[in-house]
Amino acid sequence: MSETLSYFRQDRLPHIWCPGCGHGTITGALVRAIDRLGLDKNKIMLVSGIGCSSRAVGYLDFDTLHTAHGRALAFATGLKVARPDLKVIVMTGDGDCTAIGGNHFIHAARRNIDITTIVMNNNIYGMTSGQYSPMTPKGMLATTAPYGNSERDFDLAELAKAAGATYVARGTSFHVPMLIELLEQALQNKGFSVVEALSQCPTYMGRKNKIGSAVDMLEWIKGRTVNAKAAAALPPEKVQGKLLIGELHKSSQPEYCDEYLKATAKVRRAWKNIDGGLRGCEQNSD
Ligand code: SF4
Ligand code: MG
């Protein structure tokens, strides 16, 4: 058995993803990043919302929470505050994270809570049959945009940075070695980390927009992106309209759980004394 296979719940396989879906590649990249860092899998908690991307946690052999639509970060926040010693990772999709979960996302970033969030962005709601999401590019077709999406899409990386995330990166299911490295960096950041991972959905995004097969979609993703390190040296016409990939932002800010523990130290000490006193009373009355 390969090393990384041991991170999967073999009894849950085969998975439900369509042939050629990018989500398996991204899940594999996460497992490889965890393996390379040598993290203790019993100290990792994976949390997901609802959607094709969120199915990933069902296949991974960690402690996992598969929660309600858009609420992965709300559950993950409670979990992290209760158990700051755990490495908490959220696996979510573009619809789950930026539509119904959008407010949880900006506030998790604002708090700089130590959670790594992987947003598998296939630019569409896959599981519910191809509706447009806040990350469907303008003009593209979806089940609910048969004449072309007339809304602008979010730049998730800019949103995360502006809201206060301390590590922000974008990778893709095409550039796998880079994605593994970005996930390694994100997992080591003490604070709110976001890795947007562009992914292909051949079944809805690809079919609706006549992009072609899964391989054609990978070429499409490749063509939409430019390496952030190379971008500065390129002429503007080569960068215009492209998505930058690589590490996009890194900063240092106090982490939420640390700040919360500091702020509540006095009251927690007082409660401990009261609790200890009460236990003493109970024992004396025996
Ligand atoms: Fe993947 Fe799209 Fe199929 Fe969902 S519908 S499993 S995102 S290819
Ligand atoms: Mg999606």
Image (cartoon, rainbow, N blue to C red):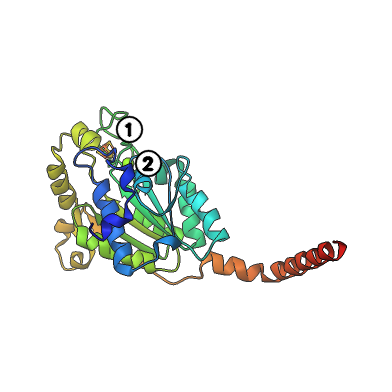
Whether residue 140 is visible:
no
Q: Amino acid at mark 2?
A: Gly
Of the two numbered discs 1 and 2 on the same chain, state the one appearing first in sequence.
2
Badge 1 element: loop
Looking at the image, which is closer to me, 269 or 144? Answer: 269
Looking at the image, which is closer to me, 14 or 143? Answer: 14
| Residue density around tag 1, few if under 14, some if 14–19, many if 20 or more, within 10 Å | many
Give the residue displayed 33% in from the left and 35% down from the top: 127
Would you identify the image quadrant in which residue 251 lies? Answer: bottom left
Badge 2 element: helix
Q: Is residue 137 left or right of residue 239?
A: right
Relative image position of residue 226 (x, y in whole percent):
19, 58
Give the residue at the far right of this rendering. Answer: 285
Whether residue 7 is visible:
yes
| Residue density around tag 2, few if under 14, some if 14–19, many if 20 or more, within 10 Å | many
Looking at the image, which is closer to me, 23 or 192? Answer: 23
Q: How far apart are the two marked residues, 1 and 2, measured between alpha carbons?
A: 9 Å
Would you identify the image quadrant in which residue 257 lies? Answer: bottom right
Relative image position of residue 60 (x, y in whole percent):
35, 51
Mark 2 residue's CB less than 8 Å from ligand 2: yes
Relative image position of residue 106 (x, y in whole percent):
47, 53
Relative image position of residue 97 (x, y in whole percent):
41, 46
Q: Name the residue that disc number 1 marks.
A: 131
Q: Amino acid at mark 1?
A: Gln
Q: Quadrant of ligand 2?
A: top left
Would you identify the image quadrant in which residue 1 lies? Answer: bottom left
Q: Name the residue that disc number 2 marks.
A: 95
